[in-house]
Amino acid sequence: MNETIVIPTLDVEAIKQDFPILQRKVHGRALHYLDNAATSQKPRAVLETLDTYYREYNANVHRGVHTLSEEATARYEGARAKIARFVNARSPKEIIYTRNATEAINLVAYAWGLANLRPGVRVVSTEMEHHSNIVPWQLVTQQAGAGLSYVPFDEDGRLQLDALDRALEDGRTKLVAFTAASNVLGTINPVKEIVARIHAAGALCLVDAAQAVPHLPVDVQDWDCDFCVFSGHKMMGPTGIGVLYGRRALLEEMPPFMGGGDMIREVRLTGSKWNELPWKFEAGTPAIAEAIGLGAAVDYLTALGMERLRAHEVELVTQAWERLGEIPNLKRLGPPPPERSGLVAFAVDSIHPHDLAAILDQEGIAIRAGHHCAAPIHEKLGIAASARASFYIYNTPEEIDLLVAGIYRAKDIFAI
Ligand SMILES: Cc1ncc(COP(=O)(O)O)c(C=O)c1O
């Protein structure tokens, strides 16, 4: 007998009470925050964790033998263990703190890339990447004299996997860097299948999970990926803290990215020896409060349940997709739900996205407008920019009604 699994729905009204910022007004209107793909709001649990750190045990980590330093170190390393469990890493040693997803990609591009890339080999990225998964590879492949090519996406916004296979055929591709979920198209890529193809060709992969870890259950062992990156601020954590997950054997082999305090075991004027993982990659005083704050965000997400969170976003994005589809002269970007993440980017004929965002802002509705740091996607689609509404746990179906009404009002203003 087939059992239907019922995922309990979220109590959104109760959740909203956890986010003090949602009580504020914008232009005299209640705030409707639909820009979560850019950054998320922070629950009280995260704000209080930051406050408590500075009020009660602010100290540097790994250094002092005094109580405050021991407390700070225990919580800083405790947060790492929580993050490791959250994405199912084998060990906290595989979790490197960085400033954000961008820095995590740069870490791999420079530390792994400069040691492994040379003329005659290539890196493969895709046409649906955020600039942060394109530019570091351009910089490093240029420096190493290696090639760089891109897997295209089709008119539905799906990666053309046959093109990936072709790029893997000649054995020259050393690493494929691709996104788990596009921040413009909303496409959720079949990560496990893509990783299997990459590994079958003897290459490594880096998964940009900046739009996946905050919104979907992610299991790096199930994906079998080599590197995976994400940002704390998009998953209710503070800014200034991000994560690189790396397979331990690869991280052990890689040289450090930056040098300085904490990442060394021994320093002589004639040379130095590196600290063990994960500290080998964490030079200087780290973002201590932010890391501990990210640990609190992980606790919050874990208590909500990622399956429930995803179910809520599927409901919202399905509704948004349908309602936006009814608006004349509005083009939605990417594939239809449920195969998409909780965001919809769109373009309205004859209204610049910045004008639309400014009109919506007057009504307290925050959306993003521009190229969303993914100019090549827009270039391929033949549009300069788009508007984007992106959802999270505190958003409601009523906010989609307000968004749609706001777009109609903008059309009235522009008389189209
Ligand atoms: C898919 C994707 N990758 C990477 C990033 C970069 O994140 P950050 O700016 O936090 O480094 C973003 C941010 O929008 C993103 O959406």
Image (cartoon, helix red, strand yellow):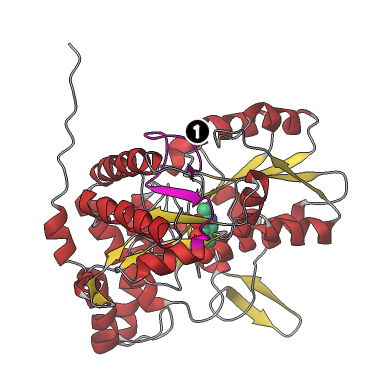
Residue at screen point 34% across, 71% down: 362
Q: Could you tell me which quadrant the N terminus lies in?
A: top left
Residue 152 location, quadrant: top right
Question: What residue type is disc 1 on?
Answer: Pro
Cβ of mark 1 under 8 A from ligand 1: no
Q: Which residues are magenta?
A: 330-353
Expressed as whole percent of the image width and height from the top left, the position of residue 29 reads: 23, 72
* The stretch drawn in magenta includes residue 350: yes
Q: Is residue 126 left or right of residue 340?
A: right
Q: Residue furthest top?
A: 1
Expressed as whole percent of the image width and height from the top left, the position of residue 325 reads: 40, 39
Q: Is residue 303 left or right of residue 265?
A: left
Residue 222 location, quadrant: top left
Q: Is residue 93 visible?
A: yes
Q: Is residue 97 visible?
A: no
Residue at screen point 40% across, 42% down: 219
Q: Which residue is mark 1?
A: 190
Q: Is residue 22 left or right of residue 352?
A: left
Expressed as whole percent of the image width and height from the top left, the position of residue 405 reads: 30, 54
Residue at screen point 51% across, 37% down: 189
